[in-house]
């Protein structure tokens, strides 16, 4: 606490960066879905309960990526409506930066 600055540094983890790369590459329309979530809407999905921290480099399925984002806490799941949403303002801001594209690099410099 010498600097007296509190931040949320978990967004700079390798897993997060790998998942964000999928959004940037717009795998199966993932970026469009994230934009919907950034606008604070819920999105209906079929989560994949069999995803268990597998090698994310091998994901080819949008629902697998979204399920992993739920498991890691970047997205929340509403079981009553089978829908997902971004659970807090800090994450909305981060996903907003990612979906704007060129600003993404600034996060990791």
Image (cartoon, grey):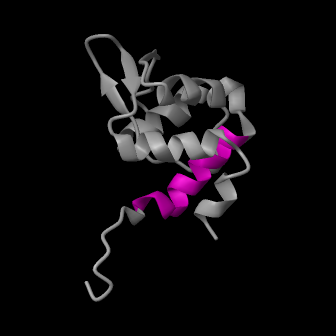
Name the side, left or right, on which 71 lies relative to 100.
Answer: left
- The quadrant where residue 80 appears: top left
Whole-percent x and y of residue 15?
A: 52, 56
Q: Seen from this angle, which residue lies furthest top?
A: 81
Along the viewing direction, whichever of 89 and 44 lies nearer the viewer = 89
- The quadrant where residue 86 appears: top left
Prevalent SS, magenta region? helix
- Measuring 36% from the left and 41% from the top, which residue is drawn there? 89
Of the 4 image quadrants, the one containing the N terminus is: bottom left
Residue 69 sits above or below residue 11 on the image? above
- Measuring 67% from the left and 33% from the top, which residue is drawn there? 60
Range of residues picked out in magenta: 10-24
Of the 4 image quadrants, the one containing the C terminus is: bottom right
Name the side, left or right, on which 75 lies relative to 25.
Answer: left
Q: Does any portion of residue 51 appear in the rendered image?
A: no
Q: Is residue 63 magenta?
A: no
Whole-percent x and y of residue 13?
A: 49, 63
- Measuring 53% from the left and 22% from the top, which residue is drawn there? 36
Residue 68 sits above or below residue 33 on the image? below
Along the viewing direction, whichever of 87 and 67 lies nearer the viewer = 87
Q: Is residue 14 magenta?
A: yes
Q: Does any portion of residue 41 appear in the rendered image?
A: yes
- Measuring 43% from the left and 23% from the top, which residue is drawn there? 47
């Amino acid at each position: 606490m010498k600097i007296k600055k509190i931040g949320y540094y978990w967004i700079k983890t390798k897993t997060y960066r790998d998942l964000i790369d999928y959004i940037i590459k717009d795998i199966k329309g993932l970026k469009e879905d994230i934009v919907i979530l950034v606008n604070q809407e819920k999105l209906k999905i079929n989560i994949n309960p069999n995803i268990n921290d597998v090698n994310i480099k091998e994901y080819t399925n949008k629902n697998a990526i979204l399920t992993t984002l739920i498991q890691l806490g970047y997205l929340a799941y509403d079981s009553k409506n089978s829908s997902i949403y971004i659970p807090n303002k800090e994450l909305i801001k981060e996903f907003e930066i990612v979906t704007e594209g060129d600003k993404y690099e600034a996060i990791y410099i």
